[in-house]
Image (cartoon, rainbow, N blue to C red):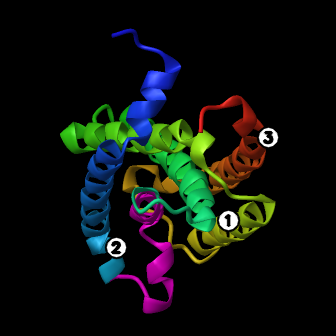
Amino acid sequence: MQITRANIWYLLTHKSFLILLLIINLLGTIYGYYWYGGQLANTEPIFYIFVPDSPTASLFFCFVLLAWILGKSWPLMEVLALVTLVKYGIWADVMNIWTLIETGSIGWQGWMLVGSHFAMAVQAILYIGKYVFSFWHVAVAAVWTLHNDVIDYVFGQMPMYRDLAEYTNYIGYFTFWLSIACIFLAIFSIRWRKYLPN
């Protein structure tokens, strides 16, 4: 069987594959919230929703996948998933590689996080041709994303990377511009859709 873009897209959008992807993302989301358990235990309840960034991003994508499986579309979930999966996928990889440079080792768990977060970003981009969100959805996602950055770096709720603590200001600056880049990715993806399979 010849491998073509149409065949790959057929596989990616097949209901059975979407169900498998939902299961994988749901398990990853559950593990992600568990991973944040220590930080959440020391977090004021008002900030709970803003602390577990990566699992919340994958939770958004779980809702997207569920909608597609049911033959529906939830545009706001789509844009939130795209922006946050790409943002936190890249962010976590940068933080882990930076930790590797600083300490010389990140262990098996660190490499697992690198691989899983890279996959988070990739899966969000792979489905750009299927998203149906509009510019107003992007505006809502932008408010959510930038507000989350304020909570993280003004109110001190960012994910804990103790080996990088002295670089917090630089990390905050990088995170802000990463958010802007991901918001623009969502904006431009609206234009790119006509060139992509759907």
Q: Residue at x 55, y 46 (%)?
A: 86
- What segment is highlighted magenta in the picture? 42-67
Q: Nearer the viewer, mark 3 or mark 2?
A: 3
User: What's the residue type where badge 3 is placed?
Assistant: Arg
Q: Residue at x 66, y 54 (%)?
A: 132
Residues tagged 2 and 1 counted as in contact (Cβ below 8 A)? no
Question: Is residue 168 among the parts visible in the rendering?
Answer: no
Q: Earlier in the sequence, mark 2 or mark 1?
A: 2
Q: Residue at x 50, y 90 (%)?
A: 46
Query: What main secondary structure does the magenta stretch of the protein show?
Result: helix
The one of 179 and 60 positioned closer to us in this rendering: 60
User: Quadrant location of the C terminus?
Assistant: top right
Q: Nearer the viewer, mark 2 or mark 1?
A: 1
Q: Residue at x 43, y 90 (%)?
A: 45
Could you say which disc has been placed on residue 191 in the image? Answer: 3
Residue 24 position, x and y percent, is 27, 51
Q: Secondary structure at mark 1?
A: helix
How far apart marks 2 and 1 lie (CA) works out to: 25 Å
Kindly identify which residue carries mark 1: 141
Q: Secondary structure at mark 3?
A: helix
User: What's the residue type where badge 2 is placed?
Assistant: Gln
Kindly identify which residue carries mark 2: 39
